Image (cartoon, rainbow, N blue to C red):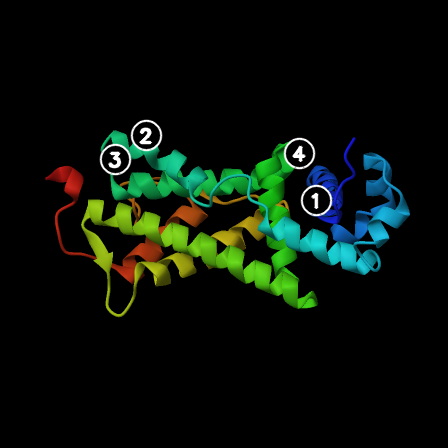
């Protein structure tokens, strides 16, 4: 069998360490993934690892960076899937917001409700590591890059979605500004879900002072952001 290169060995160790981290979740943290344990799982010696990392701290730094970089699916996949049927059925903007918000709340809650959900664990664990990004400059850089990729992907999605309903950004805002605000809001609610807090849901009737329907708190907050950042000055495309 050909001898592994140093990079192949590094990749093997980190991939198995990521698997352990995803299985144990954010509560474990990278410090609880011991290099010796990972080495045993892949049948390698201590010497093989310490030719790559000087110590446990170096290993944990690289593991944290790899976790922040890891994406099980592109950033907008879940949201796009959630609103696909609503758009196909000619749903209203409120229908789209409710569907997307409920998907995000459910996605984050799967961390507790579905322990086997790799996507949910990856999202919440990466989010937790990003809050500690100041620990290592390399982790901070990886966190910034992940955030940039996500915000740009969502800004593009919003730029395609909102004009369908006749919305455009209010001056001086852009779709990127809206995506930044949405990211902060969504990540805040994801932290609530990671804490195991129930997400408030409201049934708003025609007699209430608000939009009728079943609303998550996140959905109502999104609706407020749309009103703050967007202006509707053309008929929605789907109504033309």
Q: Is residue 30 above or below residue 205?
A: below
Question: Contact (CB < 8 A) between labels 1 and 2?
Answer: no
Residue 85: image quadrant is top left
Where does the image place residue 228, in percent across and percent down from the top left? 30, 62
Q: Quick check: can you spot residue 205?
A: no
Q: Is residue 194 above or below residue 80?
A: below
Residue 158 in the figure: left or right of residue 147: left
Is there any visible trace of residue 6 in the rendered image?
yes
Q: Which mark is residue 85?
A: 2
* Frontmost residue, 219 versus 11: 11
Q: Secondary structure at mark 2?
A: helix
SS type, badge 4: loop
Q: Are marks 1 and 4 in contact (CB under 8 Å)?
A: no
Query: According to the image, label 4 marks what residue?
Result: 115
Please state if 98 lies on the left or on the right of 116 as rendered: left
**Residue 102 occupies which quadrant of the picture?**
top left
């Amino acid at each position: 069998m050909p001898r592994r290169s140093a990079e192949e060995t590094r990749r093997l160790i980190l991939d198995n360490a990521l698997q352990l981290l995803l299985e144990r979740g954010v509560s474990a943290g990278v410090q609880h993934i011991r290099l010796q344990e990972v080495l045993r799982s892949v049948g390698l010696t201590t010497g093989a690892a310490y030719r790559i990392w000087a110590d446990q701290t170096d290993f944990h730094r690289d593991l944290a960076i790899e976790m922040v970089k890891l994406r099980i699916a592109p950033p907008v996949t879940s949201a796009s899937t959630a609103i696909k049927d609503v758009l196909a059925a000619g749903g209203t903007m409120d229908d789209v917001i409710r569907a997307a918000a409920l998907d995000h709340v459910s996605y984050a809650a799967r961390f507790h409700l579905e322990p086997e959900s790799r996507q949910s664990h990856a999202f919440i664990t990466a989010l937790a590591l990003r809050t500690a990004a100041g620990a290592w400059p390399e982790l901070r850089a990886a966190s910034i890059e992940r955030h940039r990729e996500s915000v740009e992907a969502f800004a593009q999605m919003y730029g395609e979605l909102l004009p369908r309903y006749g919305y455009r950004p209010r001056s001086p805002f852009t779709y990127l500004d809206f995506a930044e605000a949405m990211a902060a809001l969504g990540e805040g609610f994801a932290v609530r879900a990671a804490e195991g807090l129930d997400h408030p849901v409201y049934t708003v009737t025609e007699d209430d002072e608000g939009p009728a329907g079943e609303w998550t708190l996140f959905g109502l907050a999104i609706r407020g952001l749309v009103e703050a950042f967007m202006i509707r000055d053309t008929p929605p495309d789907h109504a033309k």
